[in-house]
């Protein structure tokens, strides 16, 4: 689905949204498209969010520790990398705009969006995969947002809401660090800088 020419004409009126995933699935999503969600809190379809801050939560976007010297050189000396897909969706294809589903309760996730409208359910048209090359696709990937940091991104100010979610009940979501290690970094007032994004 080649849209470099007349990009803004093609997507005029479409909304920007974000979809997080694991590194193991990233390439197949880019090549083949998005599958409808397995966990269906708001119903059947593809889940996305207008908030990149929400999508960067480790439930949605895997955080990978940069291990090898080659990776470190490629990522300009960074220690952690994370990515989310930037997508476009026509508002007619948003089946439901819903509440966050990670139990933040009254914690503000993103000051730009109310928690009650931070999850979008996109119509998958009963397809097993929403192919981005299909001209009738309800959602299209238009960018890959990459964040490389010099410390775990859980230390970033934008990530402090994570500790008011079920992350404390399911610390395995952190994958690349133990919850107590991350909490220790915060208690020691360690900082985190974005090397590039």
Image: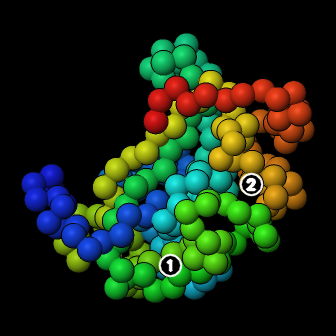
Compare marks 2 and 1 and give the one earlier in the sequence. Answer: 1
For mark 2, does the 10 Å Cα neighbourhood hold few (<14), some (14 to 19), or many (20 or more) residues?
A: some
- Kindly tell me whether residue 38 is visible in this rendering: no
Q: Could you say where residue 135 lies in the image, as x and y percent from the top left?
A: 19, 72
**At 44% across and 20% down in the image, what residue appears?**
74
Q: CA distance from mark 2 to mark 1?
A: 23 Å
**Quarter of the rendering containing residue 87:** bottom left
**At 34% across and 50% down in the image, what residue appears?**
143
Q: Taking 94 as reference, is 108 left or right?
A: right
For mark 1, does the 10 Å Cα neighbourhood hold few (<14), some (14 to 19), or many (20 or more) residues?
A: many
User: Which residue is nearer to you in this view: 159 or 131?
Assistant: 159
Task: Judge whether 99 appears above or below 85 on screen.
Answer: below
Q: Which residue is mark 1?
A: 121
- Kindly tell me whether residue 67 is visible in this rendering: yes
Which element carries disc 1, helix, strand or loop?
Answer: strand
- Residue extending furthest left? 5
Comparing marks 2 and 1, which lies closer to the viewer? 2
**At 17% across and 58% down in the image, what residue appears?**
7
Which element carries disc 2, helix, strand or loop?
Answer: helix
Q: Which residue is mark 2?
A: 161
Q: Could you say where residue 149 lies in the image, as x and y percent from the top left?
A: 59, 29
**Quarter of the rendering containing residue 3:** bottom left
**At 67% across and 51% down in the image, what residue appears?**
58
Q: Could you say where residue 93 lies in the image, as x and y percent from the top left?
A: 37, 82
**Quarter of the rendering containing residue 136:** bottom left
Discs 2, 1 touching: Cβ within 8 Å: no
Q: Could you say where residue 28 lies in the image, as x and y percent from the top left?
A: 40, 52
Task: Judge whether 134 appears above or below 185 on screen.
Answer: below
């Amino acid at each position: 689905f080649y849209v470099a020419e007349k990009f803004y004409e093609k997507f005029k009126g479409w909304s920007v949204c974000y979809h997080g995933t694991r590194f193991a699935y990233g390439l197949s999503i880019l090549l083949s498209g998005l599958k409808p969600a397995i966990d269906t809190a708001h119903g059947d379809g593809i889940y996305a969010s207008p908030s990149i801050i929400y999508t960067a939560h480790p439930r949605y976007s895997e955080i990978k520790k940069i291990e090898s010297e080659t990776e470190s050189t490629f990522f300009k000396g960074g220690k952690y990398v994370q990515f989310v897909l930037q997508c476009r969706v026509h508002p007619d294809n948003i089946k439901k705009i819903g509440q966050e589903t990670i139990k933040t309760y009254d914690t503000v996730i993103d000051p730009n969006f109310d928690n009650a409208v931070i999850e979008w359910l996109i119509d998958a048209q009963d397809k097993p995969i929403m192919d981005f090359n299909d001209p009738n696709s309800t959602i299209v990937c238009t960018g890959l947002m990459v964040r490389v940091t010099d410390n775990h991104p859980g230390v970033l100010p934008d990530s402090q809401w994570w500790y008011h979610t079920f992350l404390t009940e399911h610390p395995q979501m952190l994958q690349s660090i133990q919850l107590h290690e991350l909490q220790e970094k915060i208690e020691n007032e360690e900082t985190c800088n974005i090397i590039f994004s």
